[in-house]
């Protein structure tokens, strides 16, 4: 009898978790975006050619936006382009190649974009990677792609955003930032968040990179005060997408049935991104963190003004803006 009670309780908890947490709130904005231009970035995992980025781009295209798919993979980006055009009925969807692991590529993308596109209304820094390695510039891969690439891209496009305001910058972070820490000694010495390669170490460095995303948003909001550009960071939820495709295949096989039930699908997972990009009246919350389409409090280390300023200055040096 006790076993049956425990089993029943577990099933009930799982059901309510799925109904409340997994399905979650939806973006309620009915905004139309005709005449607006949006960039959605990708690396390869969880980007605008796969995962929540693709679903985000599709929703924006359905609203009439001119959507720039900023993807590393030309083949996959162009395939996503055709799919989004077909499903949205919007031909104003463009693929532009961008490798966030290469500062040269980021600069080339920004230069080409500014030459060919007269406006930018929303920049969605969506790309993410969860694996060790080095970028083309010798940076730790997660630090380089998840933070530095987006830091440089945003700064190169900031004047265009200001000129087209009111406009928004949306940084896809994660609740993982609560567990993050910034080892500035390691960053200065090795240009990486850490050097370990074990599963737990990689998970820690990913959390660290997500803390970088929030500190960047926090500092950016301060620097944007008095302009018509606002910025937000967010947790999309635990997504059943391609972000973890670099995890051990045996572990993926074990986790697959669990993620299918307990993780959000990509449509559910893009709702907070859409909320931050579109919701009317959230401008007073510039620099804040959102989850489940709601403003959330963050830890003290995520609001550390000294750390956010130090990270900004280090990032400027590493990408040649200083």
Image (spheres, rainbow, N blue to C red):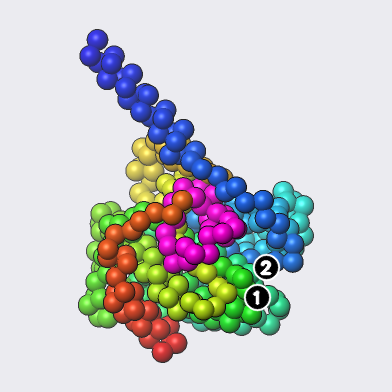
Choose top left, top right, bottom left or bottom right for residue 319.
bottom left
Q: Nearer the viewer, mark 2 or mark 1?
A: 1
Residue projecting furthest to the bottom: 322
What residue do we see at 61% from left, 71% from top?
166
In screen coordinates, is 319 left or right of 201?
A: right
Q: Quadrant of the N terminus?
A: top left
Magenta segment range?
A: 269-293
Would residue 89 be found to the left or right of residue 51 on screen?
right
The residue beneath circle 1 is 164
Q: Establish if 258 lies above or below 65.
A: above
**Along the viewing direction, whichever of 268 and 69 lies nearer the viewer:** 268
Q: Badge 2 local density, few (<14 within 10 Å), some, or many (20+)? A: many
Disc 2: which residue = 37
213 left or right, relative to 170:
left
**Left-right relation of 66 to 50:** right
> Can residue 44 be seen in this snapshot?
no
Q: Who's the residue at 60% across and 47% down the image? A: 28
Q: Residues within 10 Å of mark 1 (few under 14, many from 20)?
A: some
Can residue 165 be seen? yes
Q: Position of residue 56 (x, y in %)?
A: 59, 54
Closer-to-camera residue (183/95)? 183
Residue 95 image offset from top left, x and y in percent: 66, 66
- Dots 2 and 1: beta carbons under 8 Å? yes
């Amino acid at each position: 009898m006790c076993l049956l009670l425990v089993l029943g309780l577990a099933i009930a908890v799982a059901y309510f978790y799925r109904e409340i947490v997994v399905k979650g709130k939806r973006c309620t904005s009915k905004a139309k975006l005709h005449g607006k231009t949006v960039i959605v970035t990708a690396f390869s995992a969880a980007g605008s050619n796969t995962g929540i980025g693709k679903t985000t781009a599709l929703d924006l295209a359905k609203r009439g936006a001119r959507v720039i798919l900023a993807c590393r993979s030309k083949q996959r980006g162009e395939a996503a382009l055709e799919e989004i055009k077909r499903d949205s009925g919007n031909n104003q969807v463009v693929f532009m190649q961008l490798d966030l692991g290469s500062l040269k590529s980021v600069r080339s993308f920004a230069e080409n974009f500014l030459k060919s596109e007269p406006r930018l209304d929303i920049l969605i820094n969506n790309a993410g990677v969860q694996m060790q390695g080095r970028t083309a510039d010798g940076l730790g891969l997660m630090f380089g792609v998840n933070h530095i690439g987006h830091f440089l891209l945003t700064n190169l496009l900031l004047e265009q955003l200001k000129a087209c305001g009111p406009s928004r910058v949306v940084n896809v972070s994660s609740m993982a930032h609560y567990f993050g820490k910034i080892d500035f000694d390691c960053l200065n010495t090795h240009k990486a968040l850490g050097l370990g390669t074990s599963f737990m170490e990689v998970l820690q460095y990913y959390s660290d990179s997500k803390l970088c995303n929030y500190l960047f948003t926090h500092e950016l909001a301060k620097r944007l005060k008095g302009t018509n550009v606002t910025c937000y960071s967010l947790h999309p939820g635990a997504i059943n997408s391609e972000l973890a495709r670099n995890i051990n295949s045996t572990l993926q096989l074990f986790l697959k049935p669990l993620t299918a039930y307990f993780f959000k699908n990509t449509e559910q997972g893009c709702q907070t991104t859409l909320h931050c990009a579109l919701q009317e009246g959230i401008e007073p919350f510039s620099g804040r963190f959102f989850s489940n389409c709601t403003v959330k409090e963050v830890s003290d280390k995520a609001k550390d003004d000294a750390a956010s300023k130090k990270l900004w200055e280090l990032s400027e040096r590493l990408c040649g803006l200083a």
